[in-house]
Image: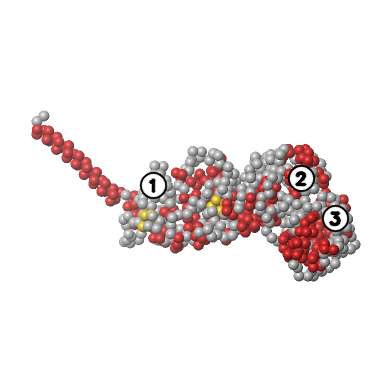
Amino acid sequence: MDEKRYTYRITLAVSIIAGLLLLLLIGAWAYEGFGKEWRRVQKDYGALLEEGEDFENGILQVDLPQFNRVDRCISCHHGIEDSRMKDAPQPHTFHPGTFLDEHPVKKYGCTICHGGQGRALSREDAFGRSSSAHWPNPLLEYPYIQASCGKCHLAIFDVNEQNQDGAIEGMDVFIKGKYIFSQEGCLGCHKAREVGGILGPDLTRQGEKTKHEYSFQNISGDRTVSHWLKEHFKDPEMVSPGSQMLQIQLEEEDLDALAIFVMGMSRPDIPFDYFTMPTLNEFKGVRDTLDGATAFAYICSACHGKQGEGKDYKEYNTGIPSVGNTDFQRVASEDFIRFTLEKGRSLRQMGSWTTSISGMKVGELDATATFVKYRGAFDQGSTILTSNGKLAEGISLFDQKCKTCHGEDGKGDVAVALNQHDFLARANDLFIVETIHKGRGNTAMPGWWHLEVDEVRDLLALIQSWSADRPVAGELDLPTPNLEEGAMRYHFLCSRCHGDFGEGETGPSIINADFLDAASNRFLHGTIAEGREHTAMFGWSSDVYDQEQLGMQDISNIIAYMRKSAGEPLSYILPGSNPGDRIKGAEVFADRCAECHGPSGEGIKAPALNNQELLSAASNGYLMATITMGREGTAMPSWGYGGDDYPALSGEERKHLVATIRAWQRIRIKF
């Protein structure tokens, strides 16, 4: 090949390559100038305008350094602030609602709410949904876009906003999700903003997780965060093997709402002036105080049920007690419930809700205990006293309800005698009614507030019939007390029978708030001064002499000390009297109780009784009342009344059972 031909071929090849490159450059220039998607969109938008009307074109963007974002969405969405475009098709349509009045594009941009890739200039890239894009926050469709409202507006504990659909424009589904979140008891296992349980992961920043942080291995269908959350709610164990979370049974739209709320739980790195005040306060640790009903819904309902119905041992290995059970409420004192909230139950799913662990305020725990105790209870008030009851009905009712503890004709058995002259001569009708109605906390006397008004009147008529002597009307004026003298007298004289702290030993519990609320000074003075005939309680003004004899001033001092002590915070829940024989009780337990509670009280098909937190919360009176009454609607029978499938236990046998259970207590846990 000669030199000229070689040179010609080289020149030709270079020319062809240069021509192709030139064509590519021309094509790229033409595509960039006329073929880009955003240019076509802008051209279509121009066609919608009136003839000759101009608009800003080119690549438009909003710089948002406060969000560390640049949004170019307005390059295609020219009409979002043009009300004339209300009926125009996407992407030219006017933004619905009045959102932009308070969320102007120049201050908020678009992606802070809508998600998506703000710098993109094509629909596919902007949406960020392509499997090849790996964009962390894809565009959100309705209703999931409402999750973005949580970035600025979510105050989890703003109780004024609860369940108010449409409280803020466009947040109706989000607010519904917030209400569902509270009612499903999610904080029973999860913390959010420093409040809640510790069994599950903290949800405070759950909404900041991208879809790449979720495993879709066990999920079919859309690979979106919202879909993952809904499937997780339906079947946590399937989606996240090893999860102990309970299934949430909700309709699809409610699952959507709950998923939206959880997706909105975040703490974004944005300036404070974008947050609402309740939200900002929660980030600072300042929040509304929950009332008892709201607190129960937030932290208790997932396990114990929305109505406190609990979970049966046949369905759940450990079972969950029914704290909404009327029999439980009648025998469990507020002290018992409050202690259990504070300490939890070791080796059980019930954790401690003490403030340092749960973030719950002391007042919220108090209110929760009160709500659990009195949920469903009603105040009969003095209306019971407005008419006479029926004696025959009272006799029948006493035999059904009261005889198993107070004995035949009220002469006494495991409980004190009511048919006793001195008692009836001092106990006025209101005292008797209040005692029946409220019971006595931490004793074996349950509340009978669930009885009909007429039934209480009938019982009152029976008790009145046992004595012709009626109490003296009016309160007794006592001398100004000396509390120090009262304390000394009580501990030297009264504690012998009634216990160092009035919890009851051979005598009944007398430093008891329920008792002292019902008992007048006249009743207390008469009992202390004159005693009770046919009992160990002698009269301290009539039956003793010398230094031990008590005058009016001495008794006033003791009564004042008792009332003051009953109002002071507890150090321990003291068990009170325990007259049973634990050896005999062990035989009864093995025969009647071990099948469900376990041979050593460890709990098999019923709650564990050999549990130090339970035994530190439960007085002997609580144990006696529970054994006697059982729990209607559960597998716990009434051993005081018996039934078709089981006998009634005598008062002595029930005392022995209490002694056996109490013997398992190895430590006393401070309140």
Seen from the viewer's position, the closer of residues 498 and 487 is 487
Q: Residue at x 64, y 58 (%)?
A: 367
Of the numbered discs 3 and 1, the one sitting upstream in the chain is 1
Seen from the viewer's position, the closer of residues 486 and 512 is 486
Q: Horizontally, is 457 left or right of 170 in the view? A: right
- Labelled disc at residue 536: 3
- Labelled disc at residue 124: 1
* Disc 2 target residue: 659
Q: Amino acid at mark 3?
A: Ala
Q: Amino acid at mark 2?
A: Ala
- Residue lying at the far top of the rendered structure: 1
Q: Horizontally, is 602 left or right of 96 in the view? A: right
Q: Position of residue 320 (x, y in %)?
A: 66, 45
Q: Secondary structure at mark 1?
A: helix
User: Which quarter of the figure is the N terminus placed in?
Assistant: top left
For marks 2 and 1, give the CA distance. Answer: 75 Å
Q: Position of residue 101 (x, y in %)?
A: 44, 63
Q: Are marks 2 and 1 in contact (CB under 8 Å)?
A: no
Q: Residue at x 86, y 61 (%)?
A: 544
